[in-house]
Amino acid sequence: MVVLSFDPEIGHKPAVLILGSMPGRRSLETSQYYAHPRNYFWKIMGEILGFDPSLSYQKRISNLQSAGIGLWDVLKACERENSLDQNIRPESEIPNELGIFLEEHQSIRAIAFNGAKSWQAFNHLVMPNLPPITLSQVELRQMPSTSPANAGISYIDKLESWKWINRWINNP
């Protein structure tokens, strides 16, 4: 099945871009990033930024944007039978136009990759086409996936790793 990513959720002058690989089934059904109820993304962001992760989706997005955080995915389209990154057919991967996006959003100083697949896809499909100046101005960091499929890392360890974004964001 061909799946398509969403448009980016980006505010005014973002400092951090969080990139996933491709939205999972629940996210695609609801048109909301990280919609699976067992995904720790919103709980982690709520803890870091000091908001209730049970707020409406638009209020959670607003909290991210106020802190200077944007969301998007490395992949624009791919073929995948379920929500697992491991089931993405590599030959079907089409990346989003991240080079153009970074040129248009030069305030971005850090990219956090939500999991190994987003990191791998970026390195394979996007990085070779980025100008060296862009890479020299943006810090890249692979983070532990917040997905429930990444059960080998505890919530506390994920939270501690994700606190790295504190150096780049506008804390309230």
Image (spheres, helix red, strand yellow):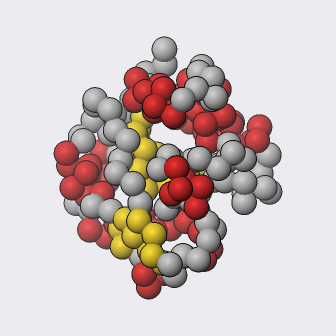
Q: Is residue 104 left or right of residue 17?
A: left
Q: Residue at x 72, y 47 (%)?
A: 38
Tell which of 47 and 62 is nearer to you. Answer: 62
Q: Height in image: 97 above or below 103?
A: below
* Residue 56 in sight from this viewpoint: yes
User: Which is more toward the observer, 7 or 102?
Assistant: 7
Above or below, 84 relative to 35: below
Residue at the extreme bottom of the image, as rendered: 91
In this rendering, the count of numbered labels is 0
At 66% from the left and 34% from the top, the residue drawn is 43
Q: Residue furthest top?
A: 172
From the viewer's side, name the closer residue of 104 and 87: 87
Q: Position of residue 171 (x, y in %)?
A: 49, 19
Determine whether, in the image, residue 52 is placed left or right of residue 99. Answer: right
Please, is residue 149 above or below residue 163 in the view? below
Q: Position of residue 150 (x, y in %)?
A: 72, 57
> x and y percent of residue 93 in the render?
42, 76
Q: Residue at x 78, y 55 (%)?
A: 151
Q: Residue 162 or 97: which is nearer the viewer?
A: 97
- Residue 149 locus on image (x, y percent): 72, 60
Above or below for 97 versus 33: below
Decide if residue 142 is in sight here: no
Image point (59%, 55%), residue name: 26
Dividing the picture into quadrants, the one containing residue 54 is: top right
In the rendered structure, the answer to whether residue 98 lies left or right of residue 142 reads: left
